Image (cartoon, rainbow, N blue to C red):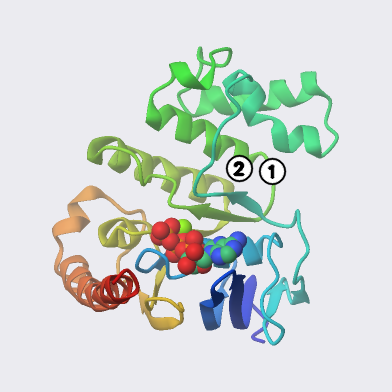
Amino acid sequence: MPQEAKLQLVKVSKTFGHPHGMVKALEGIDLIVYPQEFVSILGPSGCGKSTLFNIIAGLLRADQEGQIFLDHRRIDGEQGLVAYMPQKDLLFPWRTVLDNAIIGLELAGVRRQEARKEARELFQHFGLAGFEHQYPATLSGGMRQRVALIRTLLFKKEIMLLDEPFGALDAMTRTLMQQWLLQVWSEFRKTILFITHDVEEAIFLSDRIYVLTARPGSVKAVKPVPLPRPRCLQMVTSPPFTTLKAELLELVREESEKAFLANLIRSN
Ligand SMILES: Nc1ncnc2c1ncn2[C@@H]1O[C@H](COP(=O)(O)OP(=O)(O)OP(=O)(O)O)[C@@H](O)[C@H]1O
Ligand SMILES: [Mg+2]
């Protein structure tokens, strides 16, 4: 394995046993993420993206031949090494948003008062000052996602796995959240692995993009993003952006059609 990899997956496959037989969700995934890189994963619905994150986070085991390395060490099945924001990241409705944000610190044994103090600073820094004692239901979708991201950040791991964090947001809020996330990423110097369905979002945020095939998900293409940093909205209309966008849309379209046809055949 190359010296500098932060996270490396080698031949990761996953087969699930279902009552009606076996379902192969992932097939031979090789993936590398370098320190402080921002890498996105694009792929059609059901191709195994969330499964991949569950495997990296140690919540699921890959099939036998797969290997996962973090900082050059095998970590298959180990939990608590990465900060993971799952696709359905529900804040606890009975906790204030501040107390939702400190869960990682509490799990790490930090006293509640101290944890709250640390989280409060981040709330101030990220435009959530004054909302600390509200409950999740009283916040907008964008604010809730910022709280969930602060919570993920406070797990204090070098690598963050974010599974479609902005999928449910309207276009304007989503754009603001992308800029906000890039600010968090560069300020805290994290390594981020990010799942999205949105080609533009993947380009705007990432250093490199993995495109997965329809199920069983395998690596169809890996594309570097030839845009300088810091990213700005003007870049969205630049030739490198639009060329890559057209290429990625074509790759994703092919796989989404395959996934759609496979579902159609199964349901008939
Ligand atoms: N715990 C599980 N047990 C059995 N099958 C599962 C389990 N988790 C996922 N699967 C199956 O694995 C396949 C991939 O699911 P996964 O949720 O990883 O896809 P995805 O790419 O994240 O989809 P989406 O884009 O819709 O979020 C699906 O067919 C799903 O039914
Ligand atoms: Mg998913």
Task: Name the residue beneath numbered marker 1.
Answer: 155
Q: Residues within 10 Å of mark 1 (few under 14, many from 20)?
A: many
**CB at disc 1 and ligand 2 closer than 8 Å:** no
User: Between marks 1 and 2, how big is the CA–CA gap?
Assistant: 5 Å
Q: Camera-side residue: 22 or 210?
A: 22
Task: Name the residue beneath numbered marker 2.
Answer: 152
**Is 125 on the left-hand or right-hand side of 157?**
left
Position of residue 149 measured from the top left corner of the image (x, y, whole percent): 53, 39
The answer to the question of whether label 1 and label 2 lie on touching residues, with beta carbons closer than 8 A, is yes
Residue at the spot 85% in from the left edge and 35% down from the top edge:
109
Q: Camera-side residue: 39 or 182?
A: 39
Mark 2 lies on a secondary structure that is helix
Position of residue 224 measured from the top left corner of the image (x, y, whole percent): 37, 75
Residue at the spot 63% in from the left edge and 30% down from the top edge:
101
In the image, residue 28 sits, relative to residue 162, either above or below, namely below
Mark 1 lies on a secondary structure that is loop
**Is 44 on the left-hand or right-hand side of 188?**
left
Q: Quadrant of residue 89?
A: top right
| Residue 38, visible in the rendered structure | no
Position of residue 23 measured from the top left corner of the image (x, y, whole percent): 53, 76
Amino acid type at mark 1? Phe
Position of residue 175 measured from the top left corner of the image (x, y, whole percent): 29, 42
Q: Quadrant of residue 239?
A: bottom left
In the image, residue 15 sits, relative to residue 105, either above or below, namely below
- Residue 248's disc is none
**CB at disc 2 and ligand 2 closer than 8 Å:** no
Amino acid type at mark 2? Thr
Q: Camera-side residue: 221 or 153?
A: 221
Q: Residues within 10 Å of mark 2 (few under 14, many from 20)?
A: many
